[in-house]
Amino acid sequence: MSGKLMFVIGFGAGYVLGAKAGRERYEQITGSAQKVWKDPRVQEKVAQGEQVAKEKAGDLGTMAAVKASEVGDAAAEKAHEVGDAAAQKASEVAADAKHAVRNDDATP
């Protein structure tokens, strides 16, 4: 029993000391990160990066719109071709059917 008690006490002490040391290190790291982030040189580079991203996004949007228009035109042309081919085929089938009906009527 005393072995378990010593283990629990040791574990608790280690946890408390480790947590305190961990928290202090965490605060030190976040403080350093905040200093770097607030540095005017870093903020200047961030602003430049944002500007480049905005410019590229505009260019990409324009390119996407042009390509979408091209794809739409190609699809419309293909649909028109398919529609014409279907109309031609329907006309041929109708003519064949009409011819077959006439031949059936002529047969006694």
Image (cartoon, grey):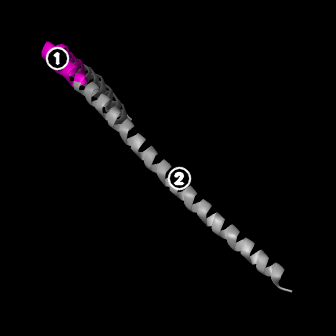
Instruction: Tell me residue 80's x, y (percent).
Output: 53, 53
Instruction: Tell me residue 21's x, y (percent).
Output: 22, 22
Query: Circle 1 sits on which residue?
Result: 44
Residue plotted at (34% across, 33% down): 62
Residue 50 sits in which quadrant?
top left
Instruction: Report the magenta stretch's main SS.
Output: helix
Queried whether the magenta region covers residue 42, the answer comes back as yes
Query: Circle 2 sits on which residue?
Result: 80
Residue plotted at (36% across, 35% down): 4
Determine whether, in the image, residue 97 is placed left or right of residue 86. right
Callout 2 amino acid = His
In this rendering, is residue 91 above or below 12?
A: below
Residue at the farthest front position: 106
Callout 1 amino acid = Glu
Q: Secondary structure at mark 1?
A: helix
Residue at the farthest bottom position: 108
Instruction: Judge by depth and name the residue closer to the eye, 66 or 20.
Output: 66
Which residues lie in the magenta part?
Answer: 26-51
Please tell me the numbered disc located at residue 15: none
